[in-house]
């Protein structure tokens, strides 16, 4: 529970010069901050203010809490105290640009994984649209891309992007993933060895058998 509030730059008192931004408000300013985070009835889906709006609409909850406070305490909120919905700009042109970038990103990921683990760009795009291009989708996609670079691709990447949960791999799939990781390590080792051999050069004025080895 907090006992003080401070003025913001958008407050009428600040705009008229009667107060400064950051200055404590006069009068009783006691208030509480409520953090909402829980799981659904099946204890499988996490609900939090930063999640998908279909699961928990933070703005709607705040507006309902404000109306209940006014009714319970007989308080009349001023215009500058009303919550302003934070509506994300959505346009077909912007979404089309996002889809193009997604297809390019999926193509880069597919270059890092075996053929059987490549992602279908259309499926990934459909999932992104269904999730309204939320931050969680891009965070999960980054996890997939990072693991692909490390030679540890996710077998059920589409499920991870859709649900946020990774299905437990079978022993057979674990063995295949371990093999892919070993192959990736070998490729990196070969690339490193190739870089080292590039330092072996024939200098002008030397015979063909006289080579300098730089370590």
Image (spheres, rainbow, N blue to C red):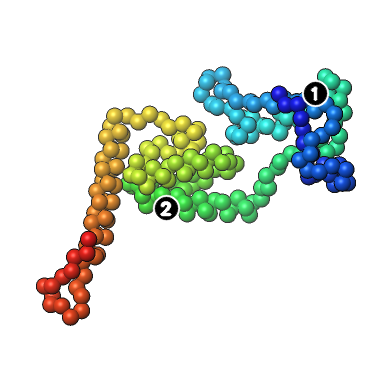
Residue at 67%, 44% (x, y): give it: 88
Residue at 47%, 44% (x, y): give it: 142
Give the percent coordinates (x, y) of residue 15.
85, 47
Give the percent coordinates (x, y) of residue 151.
33, 44
Tell me the element at label 1: helix
Q: Quadrant of the N terminus?
A: top right
Q: Is residue 78 visible?
A: yes
Of the two numbered discs 2 and 1 on the same chain, state the one appearing first in sequence. 1
> Which label is found at residue 44?
none
Q: Is residue 49 depicted above or below 203 in this figure? A: above
In the figure, residue 64 lies in which quadrant?
A: top right
Q: Residues within 10 Å of mark 1 (few under 14, many from 20)?
A: some
Residue at 20%, 66% (x, y): give it: 200
Q: Distance of mark 2 from mark 1, alpha carbons? A: 51 Å
Q: Residue furthest bottom?
A: 205
Give the percent coordinates (x, y) of residue 37.
60, 25
In the visual, does 19 lie left or right of 92? right
Identify the residue under disc 2.
108
In the visual, does 83 lie left or right of 117? right
Cβ atoms at labels 2 and 1 below 8 Å apart: no
Give the percent coordinates (x, y) of residue 190.
24, 54
Q: For this rendering, which residue is in front, 115 or 41?
A: 41
Identify the residue under disc 1.
69
Residue at 20%, 79% (x, y): give it: 204
């Amino acid at each position: 529970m907090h006992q003080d509030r401070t003025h913001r730059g958008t407050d009428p008192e600040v705009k008229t010069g009667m107060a400064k931004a950051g200055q404590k408000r006069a009068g009783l300013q006691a208030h509480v901050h409520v953090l909402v985070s829980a799981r659904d009835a099946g204890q499988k889906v996490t609900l939090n203010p930063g999640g998908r709006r279909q699961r928990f609409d933070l703005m709607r909850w705040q507006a309902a809490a404000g109306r209940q406070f006014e009714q319970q305490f007989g308080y009349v909120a001023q215009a500058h105290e009303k919550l302003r919905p934070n509506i994300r700009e959505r346009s077909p042109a912007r979404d089309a640009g996002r889809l193009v970038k997604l297809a390019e990103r999926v193509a880069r990921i597919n270059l890092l994984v075996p053929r059987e683990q490549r992602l279908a760009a259309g499926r990934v795009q459909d999932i992104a649209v269904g999730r309204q291009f939320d931050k969680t989708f891009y965070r999960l996609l980054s996890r997939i891309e990072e693991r692909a670079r490390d030679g540890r691709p996710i077998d059920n990447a589409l499920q991870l992007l859709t649900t946020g949960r990774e299905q437990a791999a079978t022993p057979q799939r674990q063995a295949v993933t371990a093999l892919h990781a070993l192959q990736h390590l070998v490729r990196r080792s070969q690339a490193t060895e190739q870089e080292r051999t590039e330092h072996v050069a024939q200098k002008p004025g030397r015979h063909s058998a006289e080579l300098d080895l730089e370590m």
